[in-house]
Amino acid sequence: MSRRSGYCIISPSTKPNTAAKSVKSSVGENSMEEKIRNRFNDAILAEARQRYAIAADNIEELGGFESFIYGFEKDGAKYVLRLGHSLRRSPDLIRGEVDWINHLARGGAGVAGAVNSAAGNLVELIDDGQGEHFLATAFAWANGGPVWQNGGWTEPFMLNYGRLIGKMHALTKQYSLPDAAWQRPSWNDPIMTDTTSALPQLDPTAMALNTANLAYLRSLPTPADAFGLIHQDAHTGNLFVDENCQITLFDFDDCVYGHFIYDIAMVVFYAITNHPEPVEFCTRFWPLFWQGYCEENRLDPVWLKEILPFMKLREIDLYGVIRRDIPDLSGDGWAASFMRGRREIIHAERPYIDFDFTQVTAHEA
């Protein structure tokens, strides 16, 4: 299943209780998810608890869409238990994910690191009785809460947001994969770009524009100082911030090899999406984010001109997902707002935002 089957939807203007949701949660269950759901039972959870030595009265369900997510306490500390499935991600892909996360954590980045099971494993395979496995991983608990509960989009938060992404990219340049079998996919792997498969029928013009944009992005160079493992969805739905404005990023399930500027573009994309005044907000947010980023990592400002093409990639992806999966927008205010005039904007080849990201380069590393 492609990771682009849905996106967390959140923007600075979103209010609590309506902020954190996903397009995919609005479109019903696809066959892969239903197949996984039908294989899960109390015995699987009990085995996972045993693997991580979790007491039955110290665990609670937290939800989750593509995985089963639980919170638990052990030895006075809080953790998150994630139960994914090998039908969706192979054990080696999960090993690649958690190894990179822990590299970032060891380097001091604000991420929720993976923790070992009782047997010392970062990934535990639990037989599902049908020839496949549930994959159990546990992570440190992220302190704080959603940004709107802890001060909102303040200047310190914007600076620290940039510092976090910059720190991750700096550490990624030092990362060596310990096992070639653990390699994560590339950002342009077919499994990452297949949600536009319905566009030839739904909107051939948008499909042609997406194909041209994708060809351009695939032609970009991949130098070691601008390309490596990235989170790919480091929006505020995937982080917590505490009262001291310290940020902890989580949900690395979709991490890929990609351009650092793609990571940055996705931060900005979700920060401005459905904002009532996106240009005004970006005028405040972007200089602070870029300043913070450059305090931690050196990225040639020439890459800033690629923010808009990467935004366009996500815009058309999201447009295709919503057209394919949400025929009735009346029950989804966020999607309805996003789609208002979207076809015309895409066909007119207008940028996602009328903003020149290259104009803010004073804070170079």
Image (cartoon, helix red, strand yellow):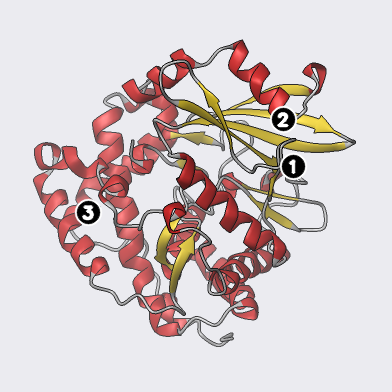
- In the picture of the structure, the residue carrying the numbered disc 1 is 141
Q: Position of residue 49 (x, y in %)?
A: 71, 24
Q: Amino acid at mark 3?
A: Ile
Residue 355's quadrant in the figure?
bottom left
What secondary structure is found at the residue carrying circle 2?
A: strand
Query: Which label belongs to residue 71?
Result: 2
Q: CA distance from mark 2 to mark 3?
A: 41 Å
Would you place residue 106 above or below residue 301 in this image? above
* Between discs 2 and 3, the one toward the N terminus: 2
Query: In this view of the protein, which residue sits in the foreground, 197 or 150?
Result: 197
* Between discs 2 and 1, the one toward the N terminus: 2
Mark 3 is surrounded, within 10 Å at the Cα level, by few (under 14), some (14 to 19) or many (20 or more) other residues, namely some
Would you place residue 333 above or below residue 214 in this image? above
Residue at left offset 58%, top offset 65%: 165
Left or right, residue 241 beside residue 214: right
Would you place residue 123 above or below residue 312 in this image? above
